Every structure is written in structure tokens, then in C-alpha cells.
Amino acid sequence: ALQPDLPNWAWHEYGMRAGFWRILEAFEKRGIRPTLSINGSVCESYPRVAEAAHAAGWEFMGHGFVQVPTHRVEDQPAMIARTVAAINRITGKPCGGWLGPGLTETLETPDHLVAAGIRWIADWVVDDLPARLRTRRGEVLTMPYSVELNDIPVQMIQHHAAAELEARTYATADRLLAEAAMPGPLGGAKVMSFAIHPYITGVPHRIAMLENLLDGLLARDGLVLMQGDAIADWYLGTGSQV
């Protein structure tokens, strides 16, 4: 790869300098406090962004210290500890959740995360509900996440217009709401997430999609917006052993 990679660096930088603030405004205007997947290094290199998200009541979810695959990290416990500490300095408390960069883990990663106090991990996109994962250091929850309701695969890889992410999210929400009222194994509350990035959804030609999407979700009866720790508390309170 050519270095320095100015076009790609600047594209991501736009998200931190401009796109983030559009997304922040969209959520604040609607009284929504999302969960923020954040590299620990962002807390140090972009404190204005991290502090604004914290002031708005966003939940911080650890996302590695820098954006590199977990398999390339020589000392995972040190990286995890550094990330948790960086988030703690901004929020005043350790993060409860974790999403690996690119959803990457090695076989030992869950053990290291539990040892660092992580309660739930979003890398395991295996269900519409949290699940209990046993590790050598104790139990951790998996948190529903989506690789399809995500602006990177939808817009950047599959090359759809922004409206495709909106349509998929509505279709998912409506199906899960319908299933919630069903008897049997499909019945009961479910968890849905969608993922956006400041350099993609925060651009002028896509931000209206996010605003419309949030308004559409808020208009749906039976849909509740919750952060990851609250979802974990709810699930544990159900007593499910799955």
C-alpha cells in the first residue's frame, strides 16, 4: 500500500471533523443516547469528540485501542487495559461492552475481556437476543449486532444507496415487532442494532437518511431504545440460562 495514504486518511478525518457533529445533532434533537463504539486512542487524539459524546449521555463501548485486527495485537491484555483506561478517563467509569475492530478476536480474546471487567461482547452476531458465553475467567454475554444493518457493507461494499440501510432496518424492526407477539420460540422481545460511521453516514448526502430512520423508529409502537448495559441488565433479569 502507498504511504502516506492521504485520500483514505482524509476521508476518515472528515468524519471526526464534520460528520460526527451531524450525527450528534441528529441523536440529541430526538433525545436518543446511542452506544458509541470507540477506539481508545480517540479519547486521547480527539478529546473534543469523546467529551461531546459523553456529555450527550452516549454509552462508550471499547473498540480496541487503534483500528487494527485483534490477531495482529501482540499483547491483548495490555491493549484492552489501555483502551478501558482511556475510556475511563473520559467517562469516569470502565466500559461494560466491547466490539473488536472488524469484529476480530482470537480464541483467547473473550478470556482477556472478562478478566478486564467487560460484561458483554458484540462480536458474536449469533442471535436476536443476548446469550451467555463461558470463558476461562467467568461468564460474559454476547450482544446482538449486525453485519448487514451497517453502513460499511451496505454503502461501501455492496454499493447501495443510503435508502437501502433505512429499508433494511425498518424491515428488521417490523419483523421483530411482529414476532414479539407470537407464541413459541419466535415470541418475546428481541434486540436489534444498526451501525453507522461518521465518515459515511455523517456526510451531507446521507445524514437525512439517518434523521428519517430515527424518526421512523421512534414512531413504531412497542420499540424501545436502550444502551448495551441496560440491555444486558434486562436480559440477566429475565433469568434466561441460554
Image (cartoon, grey):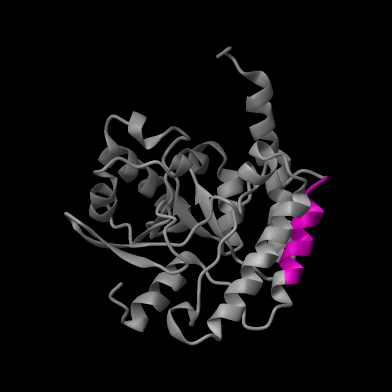
Magenta residues span 205-216
**In the rendered view, does 198 fall on the left or right side of 3?**
right
Asked if one can make out residue 30 in the rendered structure from this viewpoint, the answer is no
What's the residue at 73%, 60% (across, down)?
167
What's the residue at 77%, 46% (across, down)?
161
Tell me, yes or no, whether the highlighted magenta stretch contains residue 105. no
What's the residue at 50%, 74% (across, down)?
190
Residue 20: x, y in percent?
68, 47
Asked if one can make out residue 62 in the rendered structure from this viewpoint, the answer is yes
Q: Main secondary structure of the magenta part?
A: helix
**In the rendered view, does 203 fall on the left or right side of 94?**
right
**Looking at the rendering, in which quadrant would you find the C terminus?**
bottom left
Residue 120: x, y in percent?
36, 60
Dividing the picture into quadrants, the one containing residue 235 is: bottom left
Tell me, yes or no, whether the highlighted magenta stretch contains residue 206. yes
Query: In this picture, is 3 found above or below 173?
Result: above
What's the residue at 42%, 39% (across, down)?
65
